[in-house]
Image: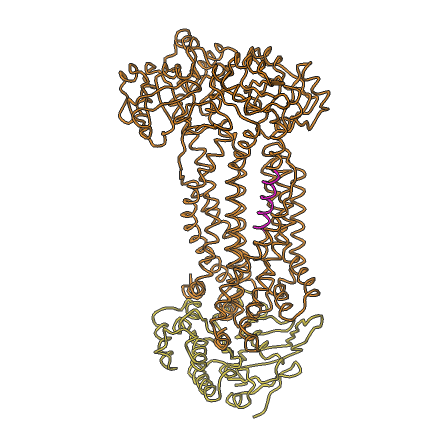
Chain colours: A yellow, B orange
Amino acid sequence: MATRAPLIRIRQLRKTYLEGDATRCIFEHLDLDIHPGEFVALLGRSGSGKSTLLNLLSGIDLPDAGEIRVDGQTINTLDEQARTRFRRRRVGFVFQFFNLIPTLTVEENLLLPLELNGMNDAEQRRRATLMLDQVGLGSRRSSYPEQLSGGEQQRLACIRALVHRPLLLLADEPTGNLDDETGAQVLALLLKLHREAASTVLMVTHSREVAEQADRLLYLEASRVREIAR
Amino acid sequence: MKPLLWRSMLRHLTRHPWQLGLSVLGIALGVAVVLAVDLANASARASFMLSMEQVAGRATHQISGGRQGIPETLYTRLRVDLGLRDVAPVVSAYVTVGADNAPRSDDHPGDRGELYQVLGVDPFAEAPFLGYLDELSEAGVDLNAFLTRSGAALLSRTLGRSVEVAAGSTRMTLHAVGWLQSPALQHLIVTDIGTAQDLFGKAGRLDRIDLILPEDAQGERLAQSIRALLPDGFKLERTATRNQATVDLSAAFSLNLTAMSLLALVVGMFLIYNTMTFSVVQRRGLLGMLRALGADRRELFSVVLGEALLLGLAGILLGALLGLWIGSGLVHLVTRAVNDLYFTLNVREYFVTPLSLLKAGGMGLLVTLIAAWLPAREAAAAPPGAVLSRAALEARWRAALPRLSLFGLLLLLLGFVLLGFSSGLLAGFVGLFLLILGCALLTPVFMVALVRVNQGLIRGLPARMATRDVARHLSRTGVAVAALMVAFAATVGVGVMIDSFRGGVAIWITDLVNADLYIAPIALESGDDTQTLNPAVVAGLRTASGVAAVSVYRRNSVEIGGRPVTLLAVELAPRAKTGYRLVEGDPETAWRAFEQASAVMISEPLAYRQGLRAGSRITLPTAHGNRTFPVVGVFLDYGSEHGRILMQRGTYQDAWDDKAISTAALYALPGVDLARLREELLSCVGAVQPLWLRSNRDIRKFTLTVFDRTFTVTRVLRLLAILVAFVGVVSALMALQLERAREFAILRATGMTAGEVGWLVSLQTGFMGFAAGLMAIPVGLLLAAVLIFVINRRAFGWTLPFQVDPWILAEAVLLAIIAALLAGLYPLWRMARTPPAQALRSE
C-alpha cells in the first residue's frame, strides 16, 4: 500500500477561525496521507476540527495555509466553481443528521447526484433503483424523507453518497444520531458499499467501537493528527 | 436545466401555499395598481383623441379663433378666392339633456343634466366630408330628411327617437333621422349646420373650418395662402398638433397618478424582495445540502431567480385581471377629474391597450427580477458551510448594517441634492423616490436603536425577549418593517399633502368669494362660455335696492406658451380686492397701478411657469395684435394650473373691443335679508334672462366638492398602496413566526402556556408595527414636504400651506400596529393547534 501514491495528501495545513476578537487555531502544520481504497476513521474530542477537516477535503472550506491534494489535484488553489465540480464528481458525503432533501422523494434524492453529474441515463437510473432494493428501500421510493425512520434515512444517505461512484466518501458521524443496533446496520452497509465500490472512506466518529471497524485509526488533537496503533 | 434541482426548490413553495399565495397577491396588487392607472390615463387620453377625431373627421387642418367665432364670409372666401374644395364649415358646442331650466339658487339648485356635444355640419360639403358623415351613422344618412326636417339629427340610440336639448336659454327638440353607430359616440349629436346655428344663436358664424390639404409642398403653399387670408386672432393648425397640445395639458395630472401607482409597485418590490429573502432564509439548510452535494452557485442562483420569475409571472397574470377590474372603476374617477379640470370628454370609453398590459407586465417582471437578485445572490454566493449555518446570515446582516445605513444616508443626500438643484417634475419624482429608498435602508438601524431603548425601559423577560428577537432576526424583520414603513409613510405624506391642499383651497376660496350673491347666465354652466349677461341685467343689478356694490367680470382665454390662460377683465368692488392675496408686490401700490396704468396682475402658477415677477412685463395677443402689459402683482390662486391674468375692464375693452360681461357679484347693504334680495332679483332681472344666482357658501361648497372629486382617485391609490403593504406584512410576519414554530415549542416545553407564547408573538409583531408606524411619521412628513413644496410646485406652480392633522399621524401608527397584529393571527392559530411535541420533532 505504501508503494502507491496517496489519494489524499495534506501538507503543512493551517486553519484558524475568528471567534469574537480572538483567533482560534484548529490545525497547525498538519500533514496527512490517505491511500486509495483505505477506510480511515478519524477520532477526536468535540471541537478538535474533525468536521472542519472533512469540509476542507471536500472544498467546502478553505485553509489559511498549506496544501490539500486529492487524486493529484491541489484543491485549495481551485476557484469556487472548480471546487464545486470537484466535490460533485469525486466526493460523496454522509452527514450525522442525514441532510436528505426534504422536498424530494426517496428515489429523487438518490437520483439527484446523478443528475448533477449529468449521469442520468437509463442504465444509471436502473442501477440506482437496484441500490434502493439492496438497502431495503425499494418499496419506499415514492416516500418523502420525513416519512422514513432514522435508520432508513441514513441508509438512503449512504447510497446517495456513493451512487455516482465518487473516489472519496466523507462520513461525518454517520451513526451519531442512531441507536446502537441501527448504527451497526448503517456501519455494515457503509463497509459493504466501500468494499463493493473500492472507494476511499474517511469517517469521523466519537465511538471507538465504530472506529475499530476501519482499516486505519487517526486521532486529532492539539492541531495535529496522530496514528493510533491497532 | 436540472429538473430535480428545480423540483426540490419548487416543492418548498408548494408546501407553503399561504406564503406562496400572499407573495403572488403582493406582486399582483402592485402590477394591478400600475396597470389600472395606466389604463385609466390611457383611456382618458384615447377618449379625448377619439372625441376629437370623430368631430374632426378626415380634416388635416382646422381654422379656429375669434371669441365670437368665425364669420361665414371667411368660408366663402376660402372656396371662392382660393378655390378650395375640401373645406367644410363646423359649428360645435355643448348642450344639456335632461336639465331643469329654472333659475338657480341655493334653494333651487336645479338638475344640471348631462353634457352632449353637438356637431353642426354642412351636408353639401364635398365628398370626403360626406363620406365621413356616412361613417358616423349606422346605415348611411338620409340627406333629404337630414336637411328638410326641423330638428333633424343623428342621435345615439340611448337618447331615443327624439330628445329635448338646452343650450343656455334656448331649448330645442331634436328628432333622430339616423343613429350613430358606435356606443363610444353616445355623447355626440350631429345636426345640420343651420340647426346648430339656431340652437346656439350663432347665425352667420362658425366655430371652425375643417380642411383637407395635401401632405406635400403644394399643401404647404396652400396653407401659407390661407394664413395670409386670415384676420388677426385666427389661426390655421394641423388637427393632430392641436389635439396633442390639448391632451398634453393634463400631462402633470397623469404623471402624478402614475407616480402614485409606481409607489404601490415600489412597495410591491419590497414585498418580492421580502418573499424571496424569506424563501432563501427558510431553505438555508436545503441550499447548504445542495451545495454540499455539488450544486454550484450559478445553478442555485438560476433556480432562485427562476422561482421569482414564476412567482412574478403568476402575480402579473393575476395582477392583469385585477388591474383590468380596478381600471374600469378608476377610469370613471380619472375622466371625471379630467372633465372637471381640463376638457370635456364626449367619449368615455374604457380602452384596454396591449401597450398598457405590456408596460405593467414588463414593469412587474423587471421589479420582480431586481427584487429577487439580491436573495438569489444570497443563496448562491455564500460558501456551503455558511449557508448551513443559521447564525451566519444574521451575522452578515449585522456586519452590513453600518454599510447599509451609510448607503441609506447617501441616497437621502442624493435625493436632497437632486431636489435642490433640479427644476423638472421628473427629477422631482426621482428625488422623492431616492428619499423613500434612503429612509427604507435606514429602517433596520432605527429598529435596532429602538430595541436598545426599549430593553432599558421594559420589565419582564418575555417582553424583552419579544423585542430583542426583532433585532436578532434583522434579515427577516428589517425588510418587512421597511416595506410597512414605506407604505404608511406614503399614507402620511399623501394624506398631509391633500389636507394641506384642501386647507389652502378652502382659505383661498373663502377669501376670494366674499360677495353675497353671484350671477351668471345658465348657459355658462352648460359649458358654453361665450354666453354673456344681458346689459339690462347688469344695469338692473346696479340699481337694485339693497345692493351696496357690484363687481363684474369678463372671462376670455389667451394662449401663452401653448397653454390656455384665463384672462379676467374685472371691475371690482372695493371688498372684492381684499379677496386677492398678493404673494408678490405691495398691495396698495399694485392696486393703484392696476386701476390707473393699464397694468395686470397674474396668478402664481403663471408667474412660476413663465418666470415672471412683479415688475416684469407680459405680452398678450389682443384683438389689435400683440401688446405688452406691466405686471404689478402676483396673486395666490388655485383656480387654474395654467394661470390667470387679472386686468382692469377698461384696459381689456380697449385691447379686445369687447364690452360684454360674463358674470357679476354683488355686495348687499348691511342688514339686508339675502334670501329676500335674491327673490327680488330673480323676479326682476331673472325675467330678462335665465340666470343662476348663487350664494358664496354654495360656490365654496361646489369648489370643495370638485376638489374632493379630483382627489378621490389619489385617495383610492393611497388605500391600494396600504393594501399592498398589508399583504406584504402579513406574508412576512407569517413566514417569520411559522419558521419559529420549533422555538415556540421549546418555550411551551419549558413551561410557557399557549396564551403566554401567543402574547409573546403578538408583542413582537405589534412592536414591529409600532416601529414601522413610528418611523413612518417623520418619513411621511418629509414626503409631504417634498410633495407640497417641490412636486406640486413643479407640476402646477402653486404654493400650498403645510398643515398637519395629528389624526393622520396617529392613524398611521395605529393602522401599522393593527396590520402587524393581524399578521400574527394565523401563526398563533397554527401554534395553538400544534402539540409542542410535534413541533419539536418536525423542525
Residue A121 falls in image quadrant: bottom left
Expressed as whole percent of the image width and height from the top left, the position of residue B54 reads: 38, 26
Task: Please report the residue visible at 50 percent of the width from the left and 60 percent of the height from the top.
Answer: B301
Q: Is residue B374 above or below residue A77?
A: above
**Residue interval drawn in magenta:** B486-500
Expressed as whole percent of the image width and height from the top left, the position of residue A210 reads: 52, 88
**B416 sits left or right of B555 in the view:** right
Q: Quadrant of the N terminus of chain B?
A: bottom left
Residue nearest the observer in this picture, B23 or A162:
B23
Is residue B372 visible in this depiction of the protein? Answer: no
Of helix, strand and loop, which mostly describes the magenta segment? Answer: helix
Q: Is residue A79 above or below residue A226?
A: above
Residue A122 falls in image quadrant: bottom left
Furthest residue toward top: B81
Is residue B326 visible in this depiction of the protein? Answer: yes
Furthest residue toward bottom: A230
Q: Is residue B408 above or below residue B194?
A: below
Residue nearest the observer in this picture, B266 or B648:
B648
Expressed as whole percent of the image width and height from the top left, the position of residue B751 reads: 57, 77
**B622 sits left or right of B16 in the view:** right
Across the whole image, how many numbered discs are drawn on residues? 0
Residue nearest the observer in this picture, B175 or A110:
B175
Expressed as whole percent of the image width and height from the top left, the position of residue B783 reads: 62, 44
Task: Please report the residue visible at 59 percent of the width from the left and 51 percent of the height from the top.
Answer: B812
Q: Is B464 in the magenta?
A: no
